[in-house]
Image (cartoon, rainbow, N blue to C red):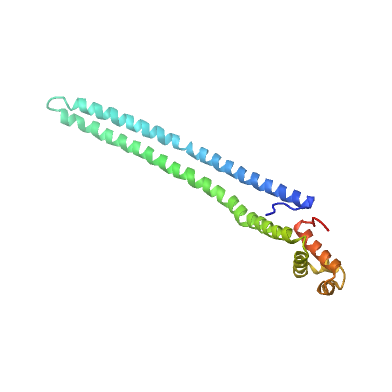
Amino acid sequence: MKFYADRVPVALRQLLTDIAVVLWVYLWIRVALWIHDTVEQLAVPGQKLESAGSGIAANLAEASGKVGRVPLVGDELTKPFTGAADAARSIAEAGHDQQEFVAQLALILPAIALSVPLALVLFLWLPLRVRWIRRAGVAAAVRDNPAGQDLLALRALASQPLTDLAKLGPDIAQSWRSGDPAAVTALADLELRRLGLRHRRR
């Protein structure tokens, strides 16, 4: 398996691209974490609301219990306290619900922020990078034996632009068919150069 080209300009471009992709992913992860932390701060009012509502409800329930012990009129006096305690519990529940909503939002928004950048990496850059690694790995494995050079030459004839093939001579295809070693080597070099590779030996 070959991860980088032999030719310095191509290898440098690949390395810089890989570094840029890693930095791109890291940057968006940091952005997603910042969004998460920022959204979570919206839960602070809900926490205070829940805490205050629970505290008020507890105090009113305690007061209701004490008032309920008053002879004759205790039951009547507890009704306002009980109603107020129920209202305070509703406030506490609203604060709790707000916290849950914020917690869900703190997960959804960072996921949305990460989805597009990661999709660009996974569906655009990564397939191209893996395809080059596979092709370069095969080419590097066969480039220094005659049969492999012949395969590379055939690949060059099939895929290289006509202008590049014409630079090798007007009868380059005929020379390859006749097994001319110079033509095979020139075509193989052309294909290797496209991948950023070179022969290890002549």
Q: Can you tell which quarter of the image residue 186 is in?
A: bottom right
View extreme (right): residue:
169
Residue in front for this viewpoint, 156 or 49: 156
Residue in front for this viewpoint, 108 or 97: 108
Q: Position of residue 123 (x, y in %)?
A: 61, 57
Which residue is located at x 31 percent, y 34 percent? 88
Which residue is located at x 48 percent, y 38 percent? 40
Which residue is located at x 55 percent, y 47 percent? 113
Task: Please give left or right for residue 120 compared with residue 64 in the image.
Answer: right
Q: Can you tell which quarter of the image residue 161 is in?
A: bottom right
Which residue is located at x 41 percent, y 42 percent? 100
Quarter in which the N terminus is drawn: bottom right
> Above or below — where is 193 with respect to 114?
below
Task: Please give left or right for residue 53 compared with residue 180 in the image.
Answer: left
Quarter in which the C terminus is drawn: bottom right
Residue in front for this viewpoint, 164 or 77: 164
> Above or below — where is 153 with respect to 16?
below
Q: Position of residue 58 (x, y in %)?
A: 29, 29
Q: Position of residue 145 (x, y in %)?
A: 77, 62
The number of discs equals 0
